[in-house]
Image: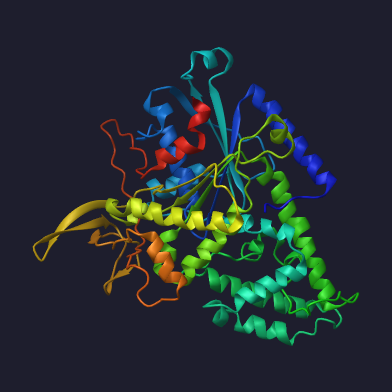
Amino acid sequence: MPPRLTSLADDARIAFDNLADRATGLVNPTLRLGVTGLSRSGKTVFISSLVHNLLHGGRLPLFEPVQSGRVSAVRLEPQPDDAVPRFQYEDHIRALVKDRIWPDSTRAISELRITLDYQSASGWNRLFSPGRLSIDIVDYPGEWLLDLPLLGKDYRTFSEETIALAQTGVRSALSQGWLALTRAADINAGADEMVARELATAFADYLKACKADERSLSTLPPGRLLLPGDLDGSPALTFAPLALPPDGRPDRGSLWAMMDRRYEAYKSVVVKPFFREHFARLDRQIVLVDALQAMNRGPEAVQDLERALTDVLACFRPGTNSLLSSLLGRRIDRVLVAATKADHLHHESHDRLDALTRRLVDRAIARIGMAGAGIDVMALASVRATREALVKRDGHDLPVIVGTPMAGETIAGERFDGQRKTAIFPGDLPQDPEGLFDRIASGDNGGTLPEVNVVRFRPPHLEETGGGIKLSVPHIRLDRAMQFLFGDRLA
């Protein structure tokens, strides 16, 4: 179930913040859109492309307000939260368009406000609405979202679950060093800072090894151990799970008591402020996932992605807001789970990627007993880095994708320099995702997953129009995502 903050002070502050947001919204209608993702899923690229296409009149046939001509102006404005870093859109879009490199990934929270002037499709609304909507885009790491379930777990539960998971599959090899230290630690000995630091470092190294590209595992709380930021070296981040007895309480001054206290400090200092100041104020949310990378890494990565989605979706309470709920604990009334990098597949497989991701989400929803209302799924490419073509092979037409591989990418033993284009057959996704998941669950790992060539391509070269104006960033289904996330607010 979604974590709840039981502190009356926390609840009062959330209600106050929501009341302030609603009061401001009466003068300047605003929607707060959360953007997060799981391990290199492209959050920064999604925001940059969305904003660029709105500002530069991109091709958005499925975004009705633009397609119908009702949006008259789009502009960036100063964000309302002065204590939150600004999402550096200009730097990121320069990297994409001018330098043709992918921008740095999200490592902390940031925010950007984009405002749309529009004419309502309803004559009645035109009488009472200012015809203006500000969208506050809140960008935050997926690791922070996966920390929210910790609010409902004590240190013993956290330790038991983390150690049990560390002994499964590929994690069992990656966790050997940390688990050996954990089992050797005397939990009842006096608290020792050097022992705590050694355990915390070994635990963080295990989490980083799980996240590495060659494994691409997703369920890796506590997230700040991967992205410590300005809390690096603080006691709130210098802790790790311990092998605890089934019952009993820690002795005062013991290693066990130290770790228990620091775990609670982590929730208090790191997780609660994020929940209270940012997450509890969101109206809509998109969660980006790299399902192709998980497929490419094998059954265990796919199962771990499903586990992460289960934890993520358990944090949300999709549903329509009443006046009271919008003030006291407003709901995120629409959640979009989007599988990125659809441009790495031929269009024939886009619907299959959509179906595979939808099945992952459906299974996650079933595990936590949610209804699924207000949740949608789609495959997209925030920036389309490839084009499609046909090549002849053995007298048959073979559908391929054409792009410029990143420098250092190797395909069939050939190493690319980042300048030369090539065509590759991306592989096919299965038509029946249910059969695929049945085989994964049965433990049939040999040849279970289809061959999908996940190649890193450079961002596309954008041609200029006759007036010297660069075209908007190409995409796949970005307009459909916009329509779901905020098209109704421009009706």
- The answer to whether 4 is drawn above or below residue 150 in the figure is above
| Closer to the camera in the image, 166 or 21 | 166
- The answer to whether 69 is drawn above or below residue 16 in the figure is above
**Residue at 47% from the left image edge and 44% from the top image edge:** 48
Q: Position of residue 19 (x, y in %)?
A: 74, 31
**Residue at 61% from the left image edge and 41% from the top image edge:** 332
| Closer to the camera in the image, 120 or 54 | 120
How did the renderer colour the structure? rainbow
Q: Position of residue 179 (x, y in %)?
A: 66, 82
Residue 215 appears in view: no
Q: Position of residue 369 (x, y in %)?
A: 60, 54
Left or right: 238 with respect to 400? right
- The answer to whether 39 is drawn above or below residue 157 in the figure is above
Residue 59 appears in view: yes
Q: Quadrant of residue 448?
A: bottom left
Single out the residue that lies furthest toward the left. 395
How many numbered tags mark residues here? 0
| Closer to the camera in the image, 365 or 186 | 365
The quarter of the rendered structure image containing the N terminus is bottom right
Q: Quadrant of residue 161?
A: bottom right
Q: Position of residue 437 (x, y in %)?
A: 43, 65
**Residue at 49% from the left image edge and 42% from the top image edge:** 90
